Amino acid sequence: MSPPPSRTVDLLIIGAGPAGLALANWFRDTDISVLIVDKKPLPTTRGQAEGLKSTTNEIFDSFGIGSEITAESWRLEEIASWGARKDGGDGIVREQVIPDRVEELGKPRETMLQQSRVEHHMLHNIFFHNNIDIRYSTAPVSIEVDTACAHGTDVYPVTVCLEKVNPYAAAVNGEKANHDTPTEMIFAKYIVGCDGARSWLREQLNVTLEGDLTDSVFGVVDMVPKSNFPDLRRVCYLRAASGTILLVPRSNKEVRMYIPVESGSALPDPKDLTFDRILDAARKIIAPYTMDVGSVSWWSAYRVRQRVGDHFSRLNERAFLVGDAVHTHSPKAGQGMNTSIQDAYNLGWKLRLVLEGLIWPPAARQDLLRTYESERRPVALDLIAFDRGFLKLFSAPSAQFDTEILQALKFTTGLSIRYPPSCAVQLPKGVEELGPSLLKADVVPGKRLPDFRVVYQADGVPTWMHKRLYATGQFRVVIFAGDISDAASLQRLHDVGKYLGESEFVKHLTMPASGAQPLVEVLVVHCAERDTVDFLTLPEVYRPWSEESGYDYWRVFADVESVHDGHGRAYDRLEIDRQVGSTVIVRPDGYIGAVLEVEDVEAVQAYFRQMHV
Amino acid sequence: MSPPPSRTVDLLIIGAGPAGLALANWFRDTDISVLIVDKKPLPTTRGQAEGLKSTTNEIFDSFGIGSEITAESWRLEEIASWGARKDGGDGIVREQVIPDRVEELGKPRETMLQQSRVEHHMLHNIFFHNNIDIRYSTAPVSIEVDTACAHGTDVYPVTVCLEKVNPYAAAVNGEKANHDTPTEMIFAKYIVGCDGARSWLREQLNVTLEGDLTDSVFGVVDMVPKSNFPDLRRVCYLRAASGTILLVPRSNKEVRMYIPVESGSALPDPKDLTFDRILDAARKIIAPYTMDVGSVSWWSAYRVRQRVGDHFSRLNERAFLVGDAVHTHSPKAGQGMNTSIQDAYNLGWKLRLVLEGLIWPPAARQDLLRTYESERRPVALDLIAFDRGFLKLFSAPSAQFDTEILQALKFTTGLSIRYPPSCAVQLPKGVEELGPSLLKADVVPGKRLPDFRVVYQADGVPTWMHKRLYATGQFRVVIFAGDISDAASLQRLHDVGKYLGESEFVKHLTMPASGAQPLVEVLVVHCAERDTVDFLTLPEVYRPWSEESGYDYWRVFADVESVHDGHGRAYDRLEIDRQVGSTVIVRPDGYIGAVLEVEDVEAVQAYFRQMHV
């Protein structure tokens, strides 16, 4: 028998769901070869997840598909709580309507779009890139990793056998496909498992999920309601004597209802739950309102699992697990698809830098890749802890319900995430741990750069900053230069620009002689009136010229009133002093790598030296 | 010789440019067969037009492609004027920066997107509709119209022979293709010429363009500038002693410059103008700033033609001319693509209603179709008149320059357009001509419904009204119901709803028993606090139920503060009394058909009776 065909790829991704597709999106416009395999015969036309947090929408913005996704999404603006009547009568009454708003964000906190449409946009965005292949009906059957060579540079230590999955085979033969005839051998530099809760790769890597089944059994129903309940288009927490419902408006005219069924003593097996039993429970709770069914598109019953993998990467950081493959929790906080995409977003740029050969020596590569686990595993653990409280809150009514919901809104936006110090998150010189004084504002190493709205110096067009932070794999040195109508501040900006554009080490990062994409983009956010600034007299690093395409007009921003969209008040939102200013190093994923003094240009150099780029 | 193949179509469109594609977009989701032919071998990858007025963007919104187009567009926020130094020295100085803003709009007045991308989105939007065919490399060679049967209903009085165009033939043979062998005979109910300034159909119809060549010769250049001129990303009017430039930032890093060359006495033939001569002229004007060339993507020289066709429709309203085919003017006000699309938008819904068989008797059909000429020809004439003044203003500096520019901005947004009374624009009973008292506000029969932002009653999501006025061919009866927390106002809304949903004649328009799309959608805009309104207790015509898809939650709007986007203040903007209210009949193209008293339900019925639907 002749050997099966084989090929080498830089990155093998198992699973083309939200995590796998988000990861692949990092590799558009690179020469890195990526292969995604998925055992599904086709892209899903339906998935159960819908909620998109604003931080996830920022990721789509950075991939260039944010506007399309937002245009197609449904906004959620309000949350209503309903409770038993206080006068002892039967039925529920509306207690409160809370705006679904987190002030710090300055924009909608959550939008809704069917998972299949989210996947569609991410898939479409990589479809015409020759370096990225997607194969459906394809599953891995075995993996071998040569750990001996795992520290090498141009090596392919991961060997995976793939086989074609016949989607009809199981139905026809009632047995599994034959594993002895792999269709192809893949030799990969790195492998990432985005293959969901029943991850094949997790099993191969001997990663154990820690945690356990909870005692919460839920029924969940997606349906078109025919009902006189007045809040069908608001997120509703209903708590009646007979039980609770979480009702979430979905795309089109559907609602989703989560209904804990007979929680407490006599736990049913989810398998015994029928649609009618779930609907009956819902009807009892929502009375005196009616709840008839227009149509049902999906329903299920399940016991919540809250588990986190003991490792997120294995084999000297040659293999990774992302999303549901390495943590599971209840779906009610709408965190599954979001966390999966955010995991992938955290890992993607690190793999991209490594695969582009920008990090040296090999030990530094491993340091960087190790931050995937050190950054994302604590997030998953926090999420489980949150989920436990949320589940309890939801199953058993509490007096602090509304306060806790508001806290939950904040938590689920991810604003509290702070990654620990590492090669990519550097604390100020001499500081080991950030004390409370440094943690007052949100501009802190390890946190996401808060989004803010400014206008371009050159044309006065307003933009949100994260919309400008395209996922190019570039770091940004964002200089909050203060009021540069002041001569001293302007001089300082000139001096810094001269250093960043001309000093030998930094120059190869900011303005490479090759004309290649620089690894570091220098951006300026000032707060002077625009007419006091003559853009083209600024140092070239702030408005580089390309013989092919002209000036880059879009690196200098002003924190001023815009013609049509009002004033973003960026300096106020970020609590940056207009005289002192601040320089913020923003990682390719929009998280803050370091916060520096504007004058301290050496510290910029030091950051990148410590990153080993 | 056997006869050529033939087919019948409801509508034959000549030309797949902005006008033809906009027209075709009206016929998505209908059973009307549309054939578009274009002699080009492929969709253009480049076109010279770029500016999109906000009223054109509203049209894209109604086609469902507004968000995509806006996301890809470049905004223009500012206009700068530059003039000769006042101190008598050489060179130009910046005189003023004006925000590019028209307060009445409440949103950006103009955005920029290359014509080819605009066409791409319109093309993509019809591509998968089986009833609409597009054939490139195809040109009409002869037309015959049987005027005898032109008043019939299911007749195809237009016969057109098409031939395949070999794009290489001219190059190879140096002669025209052979016209004796048409590839196909088309029998059409209607034909529309969207075939540009050298329209074939215009010639066949013996339509004469009135007006003439002006004595203005212009050079126009699209290029990447290498220059130290500080306003490269603002619209600039430069007036130096040696001449004038209109500089407009384009997509990416290009600018377009319009330069009148040697206007006045010694008029050159445009053919004699070279790129170098145009650039030299530009350099003299822009001095002391430099103007070098990164790259040039297009340049041309032309003498402006300002002409309007004597007819916009012929042959008993079986044949129409749209856009450049029937009016030409200078491109500097960015009106060409916009006016073409707006012409097509005006004609499209009328043809749709007629072809759907909704208008009876035939004379009423012709009445409606005749309004295309009576509405759009005056717009073209006004545009020419404006263009003359604008051209003069531009060629010869004037003291009122800035005031006139601001007036021009308003004019070019189309806010002053008012269509004359007709079957589709009905004045109040007994009123022959609108007096000044009725013309104070902008809510006037014949004007475009001013756009405004409100929130949906059901979910609190904000929307602009024109975004909601999808191009479905439906009329909207928009009831500004006032403060319905007041019992009398609520009762009035109930009474009106009962009439509109139950009265025999109106009911077949608003809630047809067949379940088909109603011709009239009833919308409610109230200004009560949302929590005082119980949506599902309103009459069904305001929130119809469909067994297939559930309630229509999106017909009732509130003029209140939104959770994230502020307060739209619709009643104030539209100057509608909160007690009295108003009912506005909005035509399928967003123009106002009638303004009525809320109580006067009979007048609603009268409007549609007079439309003969």
Image (spheres, coloured by chain):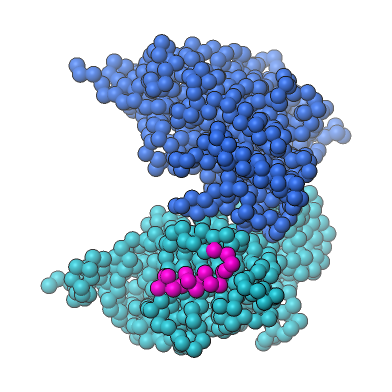
Chain colours: A cyan, B blue
Q: Quadrant of residue B78?
A: top right
Q: Is residue B176 above or below residue A169?
A: above
Q: Nearer the viewer, residue B452 or B336?
A: B452
Q: Position of residue B67 (x, y in %)?
A: 56, 48
Q: Is residue A486 above or below residue B598?
A: below
* Residue found 70% across the figure and 75% down from its top: A87
Q: Position of residue A506 (x, y in %)?
A: 61, 68
Q: Is residue A202 visible?
A: yes
How many labels sit on residues?
0
User: Magenta segment, which residues?
Assistant: A274-290
User: Considering the image in quadrants, where does the N terminus of chain A appear?
Assistant: bottom left
Judged by its main secondary structure, the magenta piece is helix
What is the residue that sits farthest to the front in this orientation? A89
Residue B22 is one of the magenta-drawn residues: no
* Residue found 85% across the figure and 33% down from its top: B86
Q: Nearer the viewer, residue B66 or A376?
A: B66
* Drawn side of residue B91 relative to residue B267, left or right: right
Q: Is residue A108 above or below residue A404?
A: above
Q: Position of residue A393 (x, y in %)?
A: 60, 81
